[in-house]
Amino acid sequence: MNAGRQLALRCAVRGWWVHPLLPNSKRPPGNCHRCRPPAAGERAACGFPEGADGCGCLSAGRYCHGVRAATRDPELIRSWWRGGRDFAVGVATGPSGLVVVDLDDHHHPPPDAALLLPGLDPAAVPAVGSVRSGVDVLELLCRVRRAESLLHAPPTLTVRTPSGGLHLWYRVGSSGRFTQGSSRLGWQVDVRAGWSTAVAPGTVTAAGRYERFGPATEPARLPRWLALELTRVGLRAPDPDDAPPARIRLPRPGARHQPQDGSAYAAAALRGEVDAVASARAGRNDQLNRSGFRLGQLVGAGLLDLADVHQALTEAAAQAGVDPGEAKAQSTLRRALQAGMRSPRTVPSTGARP
């Protein structure tokens, strides 16, 4: 097993959504003509990497939409890194419940004091003569807000980049969704959130290795004051619908049926119920119960695998904001699946739709 695949699987076990990056690079790969990254001045047919909705590549399990194709499915991960592909590993921050503060060190001369911390009264910013990098600017922000330094013995997972910068990894709850935007916290201080990619710790690029720095091995909770700063610069998502598309492998025909006898019907039913659960914003438990019963009927008919359906609906519920480990939701799902299995659905004729 190559190092990239091992790293991607470890990230998925941690609950992070991953996607390939080109070997020794921070850019996502393309794997078909329609969805490959466009050359300079060229417009891709499906708008890579945005505009992925409606493209068949995602439902077919391809990785060519970069962060929009991110997954935690171990079989997809093994497939993407199969055959000696030495892809690097990107982590989709928003779907993974993460915010990464990117502190650059590009050795550029600092701008005027008023531009170091945009949006703040320059009179409130202390002396800035020693500012040389994003690390210095974040320290300055901590002083302005009278907050404890985030950089001395970092209390959260911290990664040193090949260029000498730092990535501070934080986890956010379901009520604290942020988005990628053009705003910055400060000069050489970027924020990776929403549909954005952070390079996984341990990844090697042509510039060097992204190595863990400091004692912390897990992302800490995003400090409240820092969350308020992200909101101040316009990075809080206006809509909590910041979840990855359902990355569910279409089911194989059950043992008691030939492919033409209902597998297309079952695949369409699975996709429809997964989408219904993932998009639920009210009555999520009721929707999970309905969808579990309907798909349980197809499990009872031998068209779908129970473990696959359980995992698919669990991930869909997580997209709707339900904790995958929530006992109530898991109890509802198990009971609904079992009830459906006791009432198998009659398989429609070929070509029918659910």
Image (cartoon, grey):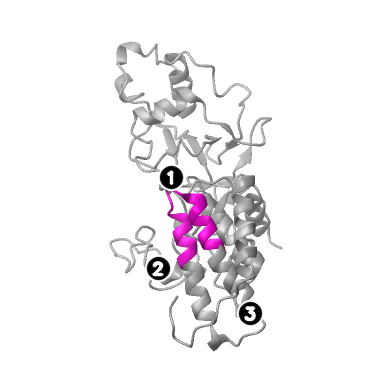
Q: Is residue 36 above or below residue 116?
A: below
Instruction: Look at label 3 and name its amino acid.
Output: Gly
Q: Position of residue 19 (x, y in %)?
A: 53, 57
Q: Nearer the viewer, residue 10 or 214?
A: 10
- Taking the spot 35% from the left edge, 64% from the top edge, the residue there is 38
Mark 2 or 3, closer to the camera: 3
| Quadrant in the picture for residue 41 | bottom left
Crowd tier of the residue under label 1, counting other residues whose Cα lies within 10 Å: few below 14, some 14–19, many 20 or above: many
Q: Which residue is mark 1?
A: 194
Q: Is residue 309 above or below residue 123?
A: below
Crowd tier of the residue under label 3, counting other residues whose Cα lies within 10 Å: few below 14, some 14–19, many 20 or above: many
- Taking the spot 64% from the left edge, 58% from the top edge, the residue there is 334
Q: In which quadrant is the C terminus drawn?
A: bottom left
* Residue 35 circle label: 2
Label 3 near label 1: C-beta < 8 Å? no
Q: Secondary structure at mark 1?
A: loop
Q: Magenta segment, principal secondary structure?
A: helix
Q: Is residue 228 visible?
A: yes
Q: Secondary structure at mark 2?
A: loop
Mark 1 or 3, closer to the camera: 3
Q: CA distance from mark 1 to mark 3?
A: 37 Å
- Taking the spot 44% from the left edge, 83% from the top edge, the residue there is 352
Q: Position of residue 5 (x, y in %)?
A: 65, 59
Q: Which residue is mark 3?
A: 254
The answer to whether residue 209 is magenta is no
